Image (cartoon, rainbow, N blue to C red):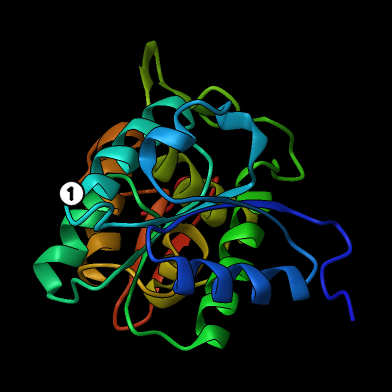
Amino acid sequence: MNDNPNKDKLCLVEDDPTIRELVAERLKSKGYQVDLFGEATELLKQKTNLYDLYILDVLLNGAPEGLDLCRHLRKLAPTLPILILSALSDPNDRIEGLKSGADDYLPKPFEMEELLLRIDGMLKRRSWYGSFPQQGSTYTWENNSVNFENFEGRHGYDTFVMSQKECMLLKLLVERESEVVSRDDILNQVWGYDVYPSTRTVDNFILRLRRYFENDPKRPKYIHSVRGLGYKFSSKAKE
């Protein structure tokens, strides 16, 4: 039965032919279209916009070429999901993979169902990343605004470029204005359910947003901490 009628097109780069064929067969059974590559050089001949998601092995030809490929693809396709598969399971290896631009990192050996769940979650997040809040691509409140299409922010007369993650975090808070959004919910929606290093990541990004949009980041009027729960956004300044 085809569980994926939209037929998202996936790219799998894996130099072990047994793993490559097993993973491809399972993905195809779920309705995905899959192109297979045994080494990085084969993929580099293709156009990056051919795929909806990349699955990359780290140790291609016995060396960590997968990380170099990941960095290259991230520069060419900043918003496309990248999942790394790797026999390197040390936390430092995982962190290095994520720093290279991967959205997720799955150590080998892995359960096929977990791989499918991660792929499904990454594709859903990509769809959310590409959508705008009800208010449209540009959201304005008091003396602030943010353009979710070109990642440009404004505070008073100052304009600045934001990172995609910063914009998506603010987008989530805007979409759920006046609601308390937990750190776990933020991680799940903006980064994915399995990210490094901890919910402290969210706290650091909240500090960045406050520096952008609050007159006094230490006394925020729009982006509020709710002790022990998470964060809440208000478009009307509150002390």
Residue at coordinates 34% horizontally, 84% vertically from top-left?
A: 109
Instruction: Check disc 1 and report its element: helix, strand or loop.
Output: loop
Residue at coordinates 63% horizontally, 58% vertically from top-left?
A: 123
User: Which quadrant: the N terminus?
Assistant: bottom right
Instruction: Choose between 104 and 145: the one closer to the eye.
Output: 104
Whether 223 is drawn above or below 94: the answer is: above
Residue 102 % position (x, y)? 35, 52
Residue 190 % position (x, y)? 47, 58
Residue 143 at least partly seen: no
Whether 73 is drawn above or below 219: the answer is: above
Residue 197 % position (x, y)? 20, 69
Q: Quadrant of residue 75?
A: top left
Residue 202 left/right relative to 232: left
Q: Which residue is mark 1?
A: 218
Q: Amino acid under label 1?
A: Lys
Instruction: Choose between 128 and 37: the one closer to the eye.
Output: 37
Residue 110 left/right relative to 66: right
